[in-house]
Amino acid sequence: NERQNSYLLALKADLLKLLVMLGRYFGEETKDDGQYRYHRDAMIKSIQYIKDHFNEDITIEEISKITILSQSYFSYLFKAITHKTFVEYVTDLRINAAMEKLRNTGMLVVDICFSVGFKSVNHFNRMFKKAMGMSPLQYRKLNRGRKDD
């Protein structure tokens, strides 16, 4: 009842202090325990496997078995970590590998398409154009010999 000058400011400061203390407490409580550490390690292992095998016919079923996670939970964790779906991630790896080959080799586009894991030239062209805003041949003409992408 006896409100002194700046009582609202003092009240806000006390409230912020309380929120910081609660944040610290719950932050300590939710740090990685064994279960989360296992999932993190499983996701690191899966991402490395994908990077090593992106040019093969890999599926989310195969990767989820490697990580010993259900497909839905794997998909959830994968998207949370990479900010991409499994298909988007694999497609990006394939497009990046194709870009490198287009810049640095004389391989035919059709051979590049299959060497990076695409099963259809039409799908490859469509995905490449969606990602880069130009066809693979246009990309090659503009970027031949460049190493900086």
Image (cartoon, rainbow, N blue to C red):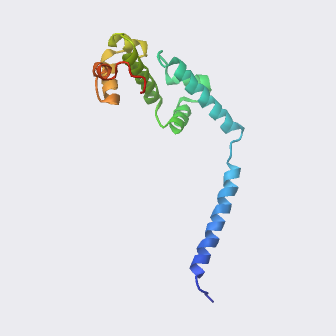
Q: Nearer the viewer, residue 9 or 50?
A: 9
Instruction: Give the total number of marks visible in the rendering.
Output: 0
Q: Nearer the viewer, residue 73 or 127?
A: 127
At 52% from the left and 22% from the top, the residue drawn is 51
Q: Is residue 7 visible?
A: yes
Asked if residue 1 is positioned above or below residue 116 in the image, the reply reads below
| Residue 47 coordinates in the image, percent (x, y) | 55, 27
> Is the N terminus in the top left, top right, bottom left or bottom right quadrant?
bottom right
> Is the C terminus in the top left, top right, bottom left or bottom right quadrant?
top left
Asked if residue 125 is positioned above or below residue 24 in the image, the reply reads above
Viewed as shown, does residue 143 lie left or right of 79? left
| Residue 97 coordinates in the image, percent (x, y) | 43, 20
At 31% from the left and 23% from the top, the residue drawn is 139
Viewed as shown, does residue 38 lie left or right of 54? right
Q: Is residue 1 visible?
A: no
Determine which quarter of the picture holds residue 10.
bottom right
Viewed as shown, does residue 25 lie left or right of 62? right
| Residue 22 coordinates in the image, percent (x, y) | 66, 60
| Residue 33 coordinates in the image, percent (x, y) | 71, 41
